[in-house]
Image (spheres, rainbow, N blue to C red):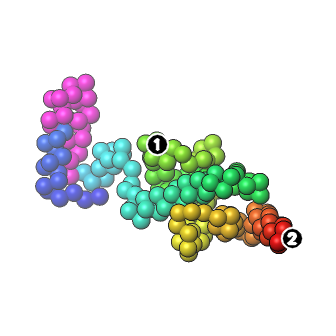
Amino acid sequence: MPLTSFERLMLSNQFRILEKLEPEQAEMHRIRRDIVDGGFEGEYSTIFDVMSAPTSAEVCNEVMAILRMFVWMQEAYIELGKPDVVNPRELEFMGFDAKSEGAHFQYAQRLFQRDLFAKVQRTSGLDSQRPQLSVYRRMLAVRKRMKTRTKASLVDLNQLLRARMPTPKRAGRAIENHQLRTARTRRKKR
């Protein structure tokens, strides 16, 4: 990563100041200043090794949207009286794969550390140990198409749970069967 002369001068001065402010770390700051002063680009990584790669705004926004969707689903489940046809474990946030979805994983980890999504029910950790992003993206696509933005219905939960699965099975069919039974019961009462 090349640095401009101005950036090198600024960093050199900062390391020089740090040498004085932190005498116990003075040698480390002097070595880093020497690297910057010498323009040794091959050694810049030793200076910046404490910094992680930047996370794009797109990744941050996507993680926030995914977590908001899980908040919405979990609140809907409670508002609907915790229907028996919905397995609450299917509403848990599984996390991201730390290896293949690293930026998403790290940003979600930061949000949970700051307690911004403390009410999201999740599995024990944030490392799902298998890719989840394609699943969450399918669910987000369904969520965006929903007419209901605030008040949820069993149909809304059904749609999201079906999107979570590669093929519509257990959850979606269970909810559909429940709705059919409810509709038949209502017709019989009339």
Give the image location of residue 80, x and y in percent: 66, 56
Tell which residue pokes out farthest to the top in this image: 24
Q: Residue 166 lies in magenta, yes or no? A: no
Residue at the spot 70% in from the left edge and 52% down from the top edge: 82
Report the predominant secondary structure element of the magenta stretch. helix
**Residue tagged by mark 2?**
188
Distance in Å between CA atoms under marks 1 and 2: 49 Å
* Magenta residues, start to end: 16-39
- The tag earlier along the polypeptide, 1 or 2, is 1
Residue at the spot 33% in from the left edge and 44% down from the top edge: 46
Graded by Cα atoms within 10 Å as few (under 14), some (14 to 19) or many (20 or more), the crowding at tag 1 reads few
- What's the mark number on residue 115? 1
* Image: 181 above or below 96: below
Relative placement, left or right, of 40 versus 138 is: left
Q: Secondary structure at mark 1?
A: loop
Graded by Cα atoms within 10 Å as few (under 14), some (14 to 19) or many (20 or more), the crowding at tag 2 reads few
